[in-house]
Amino acid sequence: MKVILPCIIAISICAIQCKKEVPETSTACESGTTNQTASDTCNLHPELCDKKFNEVSFLMTHNAHADLTDFSSLAANQDGDITAQLNAGVRGIGIKVYNTTGSSTAWLFCSGAPDNLYVYHGDPTLGCETFESVLMEIKAFYEANPKEVIPITIEGDAPPSEVMNAFINAGMDTYMYEQDFNLPWPTLQTLINENKRLVVFMDDGTDTDTYPKIHDMYNFIYDTDYDHQSSSTFDCEKFRGNHTEGSLFTLNHFITDITPQQDDAAIINDVSYLLPRARSCWVYNNHIPNFVMIDFWNTSNPLQSIDSLNLNGL
């Protein structure tokens, strides 16, 4: 095991039980789905309705599409598909989307056509599916849960025109929110009232003049380093992106030692590790971690830490 717990973490939080760390209104310690029907909730909690988008923490799955059901364990970052993730309380989806036009590799190992966009992790022979099928999963949850705001981050080489076409073909383009960089973020309640609850970011090759609903990720977001073979190298330093007053902050919180590490996730996803790190980076950057990016979402209940960030603060 390569995880090294900093002494400050080992001392302070290990004995805190879920009921002490999360208010009774939270669903973080309960089993089952989190579909919300109450009219006064926003992303599971009424306390979040009046918070601006950049004042809220979202549990986000790293390579959300790459789950053990359909992907090799060499490439799978999650255990359970996107539908299961969203039903359990995940509220951010991180995916890699690739353009396979002219390539005879990816689509031969996927169900689709050569000109489709595909999601995979590293090598399509280890698992892949069409981007539109992923969007249809998200759409089904979105339409069944009208009080939930869902950010999506897209990496890969897919051109923005094709990404936008995929959203249109999935019938999701009308749900996408467009943020002016120079204006404050709206509250979750505003996004819900306007039914613009999908906030989409892309890391490379964006064309925001033509496709303003696909936001330039690192113009709006800054993050911590993602390349860690051990938790001993975790820090809070800015790695990429634009750090301004209205920015969003991604805390990359996963370990990849050649392949995704589920055993390590069991330790670092636990409230005794994740919550102190998130709070420490909040203090260091003077900003709540908006997107807490994790592997193996159903290991050690990371939602408990997200609820505490949102409801209890520092």
Image (spheres, grey):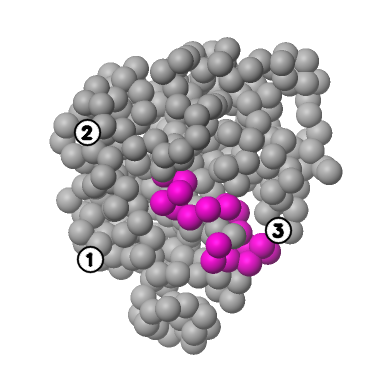
Viewer-proximal residue among 272 and 184:
272
Question: Residue 79, labelled with which disc?
Answer: none
Q: Are marks 3 and 2 in contact (CB under 8 Å)?
A: no
Q: Looking at the picture, how far across and down is residue 31, in whole percent?
A: 50, 35
Q: Quadrant of residue 294?
A: top right
Answer left or right for 56 relative to 9: left
Under circle 3, the secondary element is strand
Compared across the picture, whether 35 is left or right of 5 comes to: left
The quadrant where residue 260 appears: bottom right
Q: Closest to the observer: 234 or 51?
A: 51
- Main SS type for the magenta part? loop
Would residue 71 be counted in the magenta stretch? yes
Q: Which residues are magenta?
A: 69-86
* Mark 2, residue position: 192
Query: Please, what secondary structure does the residue beneath circle 1 have?
Result: helix
Q: Is residue 195 magenta?
A: no
**Label 3 sits on residue:** 259
Q: CA distance from mark 1 to mark 3?
A: 33 Å
User: Between disc 3 and disc 2, whose residue precedes?
Assistant: 2
Q: Could you give the CA–CA distance between mark 3 and mark 2, rounded to whole angstroms?
A: 38 Å
> Residue 157, percent across and down?
45, 66
Other-residue count near label 2 (Cα within 10 Å), few / some / many at <14 / 14–19 / ≥20? some
N-terminal label among 2 and 1: 1
Name the side, left or right, on which 195 lies relative to 25: left
* Foreground residue among 90 and 254: 90
Residue type beneath disc 1: Asn
Q: Are marks 1 and 3 in contact (CB under 8 Å)?
A: no
Quarter in which the C terminus is drawn:
top right
For label 1, the residue is: 169
Q: Earlier in the sequence, mark 1 or mark 3?
A: 1
